[in-house]
């Protein structure tokens, strides 16, 4: 794994979000550098998806700033968005377009020359083993196929920053492994990868640094070694549970057994 | 089985109660007002039907109108046929709508999977859904039909038996058409996937609405020939004795007259027909229904023939605007549900073209003559037709993205880019259909070339403004959480947009047509001023709504 250096490609400064008086994210500060895979972990409802949406401009923060490279995503959205790609946890794709037509659409939005879209799209379809389904409507794709199509669409314009929300959920082991390999390759080429996941094993094996969010606040951040120094647990799961107060669930498991 | 059914129905009732109690205060007030309105309508129908029956009897007895009523036929026979005709006329739309109802509640409901994995008999799920779907039908029957028949029975002096039988007949009435429709649906789903069947039904529903519209437009021509003093007698032919609805009607009259033998005969027949068919439905549901549900997976797909895209770009529009337009124009013909929304305005266009071509009032024999009111009437008709199409394309322009809107919001494009793309799609009807209409006007009216050019420019310019209003308001008040295309347009966008583009269109016609009629007296400068005002008005109609749409899009959270 490589560690990122230089200017951060993703910067969050005091990001805060309230919904009807309820605080979903209460001031998140983080930096992610090019060449590193950054894991954003937390229990359900901790604020992971809200944070990621503020970072990519889909949600306006109640306060704070988010930068992609040197561009404020909310003040200068267009140059910032040109640098990033995003794959949601459940990608909603146009059901009545084929995979190929979807790439043409995304290519048009990102002003990619059509010939390049055609070439790159074919490469990505082959890479994700979707070449036989290229002219089928997306509405007939399984969840895993949609996930791979969404990732291919996000990679079409060679983003410098890639955001993924639960990228391996619902994927078969082969596809999940493929995505992990792709993320490592992207990081090796200098892309900053920001991913959220519930699967701590993935974070442990893949991520250079992690941040743990609970109750809308980042309660721990750093490399795994740094986190282990501040905790009695050895594995990320132990660290995660001790920080997020999950140890008492063992009692519940005993009752249900 | 009944325990499972009761559990499901109770949960649905709790959902309805919570939706009301936890809803906004405005919604609660509107619900109460709706209830009051329904009570008012019921009472009005009860009084009206009684008034009509009593009034006709009084008129039939009078010397002055006796001859007319003699031509109409036996009033007693006509009155006796009223329950049968009304029950049958209510049962037919119930049958037609029951297929769509069965599809949406039995096969396409979102909670279906979670219900079917529980250890509850499939019949329980089926029965609960069936009964739940009868609620709106019963509402219509007891708000509209029951009061009318109540007043009818009271006016004719029927005994208490009529009113008791009325409640029973109406309670059992929906079982017949809904059971038939449900059985038909379960059989169809074995052959056609449920989602595809829904799309096809949407198109059929659109065509049906079109037939009703064309019928209403042609009514004044047809009525002159059909509505005569003998019409009522001819209507009695539709009182078909073999229909179960007619047995229910005869049961009502027999109960009102106290004829116990007839009550037993028709009551048994009606009960067997309605309840019997319902029981058959329940029995067959176990196999038919389950088979249809498990066959539903993976039916959204399909293969599309690949089109080569040129390396230099795809046609006239490149970049993000072209990408959005191409995407929308690709999706529209493939999505039957959305296409069916366009069917109605497109068919209206075809209908009016046919009317114009066949009606000699629209044809002028004077080549190059001055424009008349009829000329501008044709232009107004064409603009109205284009507006119908444009309002669907424009008001729903952004909402059509639905859950996919994140793709546009995430892309490195300004909201204006999205708006211009949607505006262009909304303008298309004026460019295409409008040009065809102008060609038609040229063919029929044979105006001067200058007048024809003016008409064409009026179409194109009006289209700029109408498309601006519809696209702008559609973007300002989008709805991305729709499940059916009918629910794509928000109420605000629909109401405000519709009002504005009618005002705008009227002003445009006034600016251009007004000086044509006043010009000879007041000078040609008024003509130029009219066009100047039209251009200025168009600029405002284009710019202001799009500005509103852009500012709302910038603040939109996804």
Image: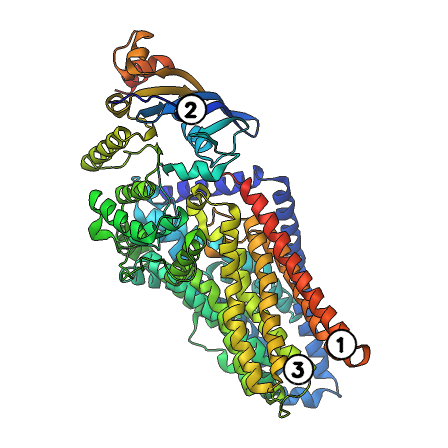
Find numbered disc 3 in the image and state the secondary structure of the residue it sits on.
Answer: helix
Find numbered disc 2 in the image and state the secondary structure of the residue it sits on.
Answer: loop
Q: Chain of mark 2?
A: A
In the image, taking residue B119 as reference, residue B410 lies left or right, namely right
Q: Quadrant of residue A89?
A: top left
**Disc marking residue B374:** 3
- The extreme right residue here reads B521
- The number of numbered discs placed on residues in the rendered structure image is 3
Q: Quadrant of residue A186?
A: top left
Instruction: Report the front residue among B316 and B44.
Output: B316
Q: Chain of mark 3?
A: B
- CA gap between label 2 and label 1 equals 71 Å
Q: Picture coordinates of residue B130 (x, y %)?
A: 40, 53
Discs 2, 3 touching: Cβ within 8 Å: no
Q: How many residues crowd around disc 1 within 10 Å: few (fewer than 14), some, or many (20 or more)?
A: some
- CA gap between label 2 and label 3 equals 67 Å
Instruction: Report the front residue among B172 and B191.
Output: B191
Instruction: Report the front residue among B21 and B427.
Output: B427
- CA gap between label 3 and label 1 equals 22 Å
Task: Give me the residue at 21% from left, 32% from top.
Answer: A181
Task: Give me the residue at 57% from left, 44% from top.
Answer: B552
Instruction: Report the front residue among B347 and B149.
Output: B347
Q: Which residue is mark 1?
A: B524
Quadrant location of the C terminus of chain A?
Answer: top left
**Disc marking residue A46:** 2
Up the image or down, B521 lies above or below A25; here it is: below
Q: Are marks 2 and 3 on the same chain?
A: no
């Amino acid at each position: 794994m490589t560690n990122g250096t230089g200017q951060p490609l993703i910067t969050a400064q005091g990001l805060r979000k309230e919904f009807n008086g309820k605080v979903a994210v209460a001031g998140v500060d983080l930096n992610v550098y090019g060449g590193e895979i950054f894991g954003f972990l937390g229990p359900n409802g901790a604020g992971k998806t809200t944070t990621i949406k503020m970072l990519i401009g889909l949600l306006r923060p109640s306060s704070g700033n988010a930068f992609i490279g040197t561009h404020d995503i909310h003040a200068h959205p267009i140059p910032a968005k040109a640098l990033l790609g995003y794959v949601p946890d459940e990608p909603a794709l146009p059901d009545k377009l084929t995979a190929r037509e979807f790439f043409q659409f995304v290519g048009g939005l990102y002003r990619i020359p059509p010939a390049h879209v055609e070439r790159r799209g074919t490469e990505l379809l082959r890479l994700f083993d979707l070449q036989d389904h290229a002219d089928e409507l997306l509405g007939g794709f399984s969840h895993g196929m949609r996930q791979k199509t969404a990732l291919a669409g996000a990679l079409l314009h060679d983003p410098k920053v890639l955001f993924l929300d639960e990228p391996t959920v619902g994927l078969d082991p082969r596809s999940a492994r493929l995505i992990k390999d792709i993320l490592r390759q992207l990081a090796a080429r200098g892309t900053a990868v920001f991913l959220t996941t519930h699967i701590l094993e993935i974070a442990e094996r893949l991520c250079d640094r992690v941040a743990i969010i609970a109750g809308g606040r980042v309660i721990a951040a750093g490399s795994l070694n740094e986190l282990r120094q501040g905790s009695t647990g050895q594995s990320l799961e132990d660290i995660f549970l001790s920080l997020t107060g999950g140890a008492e669930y063992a009692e519940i498991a005993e009752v249900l057994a | 089985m009944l325990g499972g059914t009761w559990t499901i129905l109770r949960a649905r009732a709790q959902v309805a109660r919570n939706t009301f109690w936890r809803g906004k205060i405005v919604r609660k007030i509107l619900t109460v007002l709706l209830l009051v309105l329904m009570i008012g309508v019921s009472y009005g129908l009860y009084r009206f039907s009684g008034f009509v029956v009593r009034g006709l009897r009084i008129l039939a007895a009078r010397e002055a109108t006796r001859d007319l009523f003699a031509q109409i036929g036996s009033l007693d026979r006509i009155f006796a046929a009223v329950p049968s005709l009304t029950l049958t006329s209510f049962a037919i739309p119930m049958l037609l709508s029951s297929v769509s109802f069965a599809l949406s509640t039995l096969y396409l409901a979102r909670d279906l999977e979670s219900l079917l994995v529980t250890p509850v008999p499939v019949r329980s799920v089926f029965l609960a859904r069936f009964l739940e779907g009868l609620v709106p039908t019963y509402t219509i029957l007891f708000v509209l039909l029951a009061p009318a028949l109540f007043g009818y029975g009271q006016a004719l002096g029927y005994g208490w038996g009529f009113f008791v039988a009325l409640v029973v007949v109406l309670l059992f009435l929906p079982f017949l058409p809904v059971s038939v429709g449900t059985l038909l649906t379960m059989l169809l789903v074995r052959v056609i996937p449920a989602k595809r069947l829904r799309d096809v039904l949407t198109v059929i529903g659109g065509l049906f609405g079109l037939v009703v519209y064309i019928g209403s437009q042609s009514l004044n021509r047809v009525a002159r020939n059909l509505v005569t003093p003998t019409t009522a007698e001819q209507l009695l032919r539709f009182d078909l004795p073999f229909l179960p609805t007619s047995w229910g009607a005869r049961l009502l009259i027999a109960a009102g007259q106290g004829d116990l033998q007839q009550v037993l005969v028709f009551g048994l027949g009606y009960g067997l027909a309605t309840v019997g068919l319902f029981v058959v439905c329940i029995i067959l549901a176990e196999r038919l229904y389950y088979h249809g549900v498990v066959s539903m997976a993976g039916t959204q797909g399909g293969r599309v023939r690949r089109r080569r895209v040129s390396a230099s770009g795809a046609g006239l529009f490149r970049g993000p605007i072209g990408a959005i337009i191409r995407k929308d124009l690709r999706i529209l013909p493939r999505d039957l549900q959305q296409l069916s929304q366009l069917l109605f305005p497109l068919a209206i266009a075809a209908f009016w073209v046919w009317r114009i071509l066949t009606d000699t009032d629209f044809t002028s024999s004077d080549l190059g003559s001055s424009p008349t009111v009829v000329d501008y009437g044709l232009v107004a008709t064409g603009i109205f037709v284009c507006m119908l199409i444009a309002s669907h394309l424009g008001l729903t322009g952004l909402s059509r993205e639905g859950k996919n809107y994140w793709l546009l919001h995430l892309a490195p494009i300004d909201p204006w880019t999205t708006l211009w793309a949607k505006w262009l799609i909304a303008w298309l009807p004026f460019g295409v259909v409008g040009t065809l209409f102008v060609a038609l006007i040229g063919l029929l009216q044979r105006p001067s070339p200058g007048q024809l050019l003016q008409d064409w420019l009026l179409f194109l310019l009006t289209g700029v403004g109408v498309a601006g209003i519809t696209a702008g308001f559609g973007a300002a008040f989008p709805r991305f959480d729709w499940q059916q295309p009918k629910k794509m347009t928000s109420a605000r966008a629909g109401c405000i947009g519709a009002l504005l583009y009618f005002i705008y269109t009227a002003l445009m016609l006034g600016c251009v047509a007004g000086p044509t009629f006043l010009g000879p007296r007041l000078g040609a400068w008024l003509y130029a001023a009219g066009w100047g005002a039209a251009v200025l008005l168009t600029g405002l109609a284009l710019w202001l709504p799009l500005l509103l749409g852009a500012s709302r899009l910038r603040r939109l959270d996804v």
